[in-house]
Amino acid sequence: MAKLYFYYSAMNAGKTTLLLQSAHNYRERGMNPLLFTPALDDRHRVGVVRSRIGLESAAVAFSGKDDLFECVQERLSEQNIHCVLVDEAQFLTRDQVFQLTEVVDRLSIPTLCFGLRTDFQGELFEGSHYLLAWADQLQELKTICHTGKKATMVVRVDEEGYALRKGSQVEIGGNERYVSVSRKEFKDVFYAGKQIRMIDPLEKAAEDQGEEQEEIWGQSKEAE
């Protein structure tokens, strides 16, 4: 039986990688997945789903005015479709989530949506709101806060690591300005003004290497 699935998480939990892996699995079995991605997501190329680890696939770019049910029907007239996959599903409108339920209920095509649950202010996105309400199956994808707890929320920060409390809900690009955090850390950062120190991976590697060299130097001095 076809179902509507919603895979949700904070950022950097591997949602897009899982979507692309699912598409690969269908193709490997000689089946045709249909991928959708928001046209407003132009970080790479419009109409391309791309993960942070470099995997990518062509997709149908949609805007808020597009009827996804009609789009799937049109594609069905050209070839069979075995699965619908939607990236950045938080940007769907209420009507589009309803249209995806029609894809499942009337066309019997399983539909998998991947997206964030909440925005940088802790509020539900429209698409996520209705997916949480109408999806047949919900699946949380887990990632970790820098405190070691499970990250369930996202904050948008400035260059110094302080939370931005105002601004547009949608801001494409600038992923370095978003940090996945636990609920407790979100409250400390967003409401209490706690600073998050942004650590560049290369900087962290240099620090670790420096500490390791100091430890080796200390051991050699003791040996003397």
Image (spheres, rainbow, N blue to C red):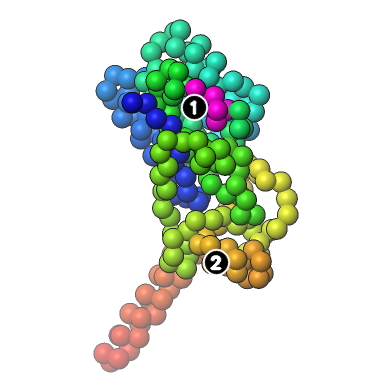
Q: Amino acid at mark 1?
A: Thr
Q: Does the residue at mark 1 contact the one at mark 2 (Cβ under 8 Å)?
A: no
Q: Amino acid at mark 2?
A: Glu
Q: Tell me, for residue 154, which label it has, or none.
A: none
Residue 16 lies left or right of residue 40; in this view the side is left
- 105 w.r.t. 166: above or below: above
- Residue 147 x/y as whole percent: 47, 68
Residue 173 lies left or right of residue 12; in this view the side is right
Does the segment drawn in magenta span residue 46?
Answer: no
Residue sitting at 30 percent across and 85 percent down? 220
**Residue that numbered label 2 is attached to:** 185
Does the segment drawn in magenta span residue 100?
Answer: yes
Instruction: Specify whether residue 59 is in view.
Output: no
Residue 187 lies left or right of residue 206; in this view the side is right
User: SS of the residue at dot 1?
Assistant: helix
Residue sitting at 49 percent across and 22 percent down? 102
Q: Which is more foreground, mark 1 or mark 2?
A: 1
Instruction: Specify whether residue 135 is in view.
Output: yes
- Residue 19 x/y as whole percent: 41, 35
**Image quarter of residue 32:** top left
Q: Nearer the viewer, residue 148 or 213?
A: 148
Q: Residues within 10 Å of mark 2 (few under 14, many from 20)?
A: many
Q: Tell me, for residue 101, which label it has, or none.
A: 1
Q: Which residues are magenta?
A: 96-102
**The N terminus lies in which quarter of the figure?**
top left
- 206 w.r.t. 22: above or below: below
**The C terminus lies in which quarter of the figure?**
bottom left
